[in-house]
Amino acid sequence: MSLFALIAQETPQFLPQNIAFGVIAVISVVAALKMVTTSNVVHAALYLVLVLASVAATYILLAAEFVAATQILVYIGAVMVLMLFGVMLTRAQIGAEDDLNHDQRWIGGLVAALLLAVMSYALIDHYGDDRLPETIVPQTTAEVSDEIFSTYIVPFEAISVLLLAALIGAIVVARRD
Amino acid sequence: MSALLSVELAYWQSTPIRLIFALVAVLLPAGGAVYLYLFKMMSFMQSRLGPMEAGPYGSMQLLAEVGKWMQKEDIFPRKADKIVFALAPYVVLLSTFLLVLVVPFGPDAYFVDLDVGVFFALAVSSVSVIGILMAGWASANKYSLLGGLRAAGQLIAYELPMVLAVVGVVIQAGTLSMQGIVRAQAEGEIFGFGGLGNPYIITQFVGFAIFMIAVQAELSMTPFDMPIAESELVTGYLTEYSGMRFLLFFIGEFATANIFAFFASVLFLGGWTVPPFITDIFGIEYDDAIFNVLGPIVMLTKMLLVTFLVYWARFSYPRFREDQLQRFAWKILIPISLVNIFVTGVLKVVF
C-alpha cells in the first residue's frame, strides 16, 4: 500500500487514474510479451488485439477520446480483423507450432531495446520533471478537426494522397486482367 | 444518472447503478423484441400461432428457453482451442454492452455523453467481428471457419456504408455527440416550420435507408445470413456451440439488433424527444425532469418501430449469394452514400 500512499500524497486528484494506468500497463506489457513468445499464430494475433485495446484505454485515460475511438476502429476493427482473416485462411492450425521462432530473434530483441532506450531518452529529456496540470480538460473533436484542417492541412493532404496511391497500387497488384 | 436521483454519488457508488441500468437496457428490450417479433410476428406471417403454452399467449416462452439452455451440457469439441472457444461469446457481448453506453434515454438519463458518441459507437461495433472470428477458428471445424470468414468479410464490407450513411447526419447536426444530435433534431426547423422539429429521416432519407440495410448486414439477419447459412454451412460459426455459450451469442445478436435500432432512432427519428408541437400543448420543456421518465418510453416505442422493419425484412426475403452481397456493398451502397455526403455538404453550405 505504500506505493498507493505515495501516489495519493503526491497527486491526490489523479489516484484513480494512476491505479487504472497501472492495471492497463501491466495488461499491455504482459500481452505484448505473450504475443512474441506464444507458439500459435492466432494466439499471437489475439494478444496483439489486447495490446492495441490497452493502448486505446491509455488514450482514454489521457482524455483523448477521439484518438481512442480511432485506435479501436482502425487497429482492432480493420487491421487486426484483416490479419486474423489472412492467418485463418492460410495457416489456421490449432495447437503449438514448432517453426515459429526465427534465428534473428536476438537481433530483433536488440533493436527493440534500442528503440525503447531512444524513446525513453527523448521523453525524459523533453518533459523531465514536468507535472500534469491540476485539472485536465478533455480535448473535444471540434478542436482536433480545427487543428487538422488549419495547422496540419499540408501533412493531412499528403497522407491522403499517399493512402490513395497505396489503394490504387493494391488494386493494380491484385488485378491480373 | 446521478442527476436523475438529485444526489451526488461517488464513482464506486454510481458504477453498480450504471451496471444494473445497462443490463436492463440491453436485456429487457431484447427479450421483448424476441417475443414480439421472432416468436409472434414470424408465426403470424407464416399462418401459425407460435408459442402458446408457457404463460398467457406464450409470453413466458423466452424464460423457459433460457432455463432450457442453462441446463444443457457445456460441450467442447475435442480438438477445439478451449480458451479461445470459451472467450469468443464474451467478446461479442462486450461489443454489445459498449454500444449501449452511448445511447441517450433522456436529458439526464444517459450512461455517458461522449463528445465522440457516434464515432465511438461505430468503432466498438466492429469489436464483435473479432469474437466471431475467434468462435469460427477455435471450433476446429471447417464449416465454422468458413462461417467466421464469411462473417468477417461481410461485416468489413458493410461497416463502410454504415459509417458513410451516418456522416450525412453528423454534417447536418454539426456534432458527433448523441445528445447534440438529439437536440439538433428537436430544435431544427423545416423551412421555418418548427412544429415537427427536424427529424433527419426527412432530410436524410437516403442515409436512413443505407443505414438500415447496413444494420441488417452487420447483424447477419436474413437476407444477409450467409455466415450462418443453415443449408450450406450447418450454422456457420455457431455450429459447435451449445447451452449457455449459444445463449450468449443469441443474446448478443438480438440485443445488438435493438441497440442499432436505438441508434437509428437517435440519428434519424429524434431520439428521446417528441415533436415540439406536443410539448407545446402540455407546456413542458425538453430539460424538465419528466423527460427522464418519458424519454426511455419514447425511445422504446421508436426502437420497436425500427426493429419491426428489421424483422419484417428478415422474414420476407431469401438469402443473397456471397458475390451479390459484396457487389451490393461496394458497387451500390458506397457510391450512393458518397453522393449523399457530397449533396448534404453542398446543401449545408448553401442554406
Image: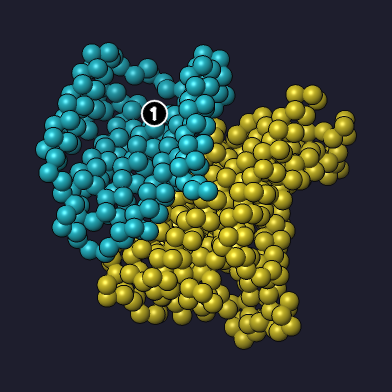
Chain colours: A cyan, B yellow
Question: Is the residue A91 above or below the residue A107 in the image?
Answer: below
Q: Residue at x 60, y 35 (%)?
A: B177
Viewer-closest of A111 and B293: A111
Q: Across the whole image, how many numbered discs are drawn on residues?
A: 1
Q: Position of residue B285 (x, y in %)?
A: 75, 37
Position of the N terminus of chain B by quadrant: top right
Amino acid type assigned to the residue bearing label 1 in the image: Leu
Residue of label 1: A62
Q: Give the SS element for disc 1.
A: loop
Q: Residue at x 15, y 46 (%)?
A: A102
Q: For the view shown, which residue lies furthest in the front direction? A: A177
* Residue B106 location, quadrant: top right
Chain of the residue that carries numbered disc 1 in the rendered image: A
The answer to whether residue B280 is left or right of residue B101 is right
Q: Residue at x 64, y 49 (%)?
A: B331
Q: Residue at x 48, y 73 (%)?
A: B233
Q: Which percent across, then down, holds residue B65?
A: 51, 78
Q: Nearer the viewer, residue A35 or A10?
A: A35
The image position of residue B334, as x and y in percent, is 64, 45
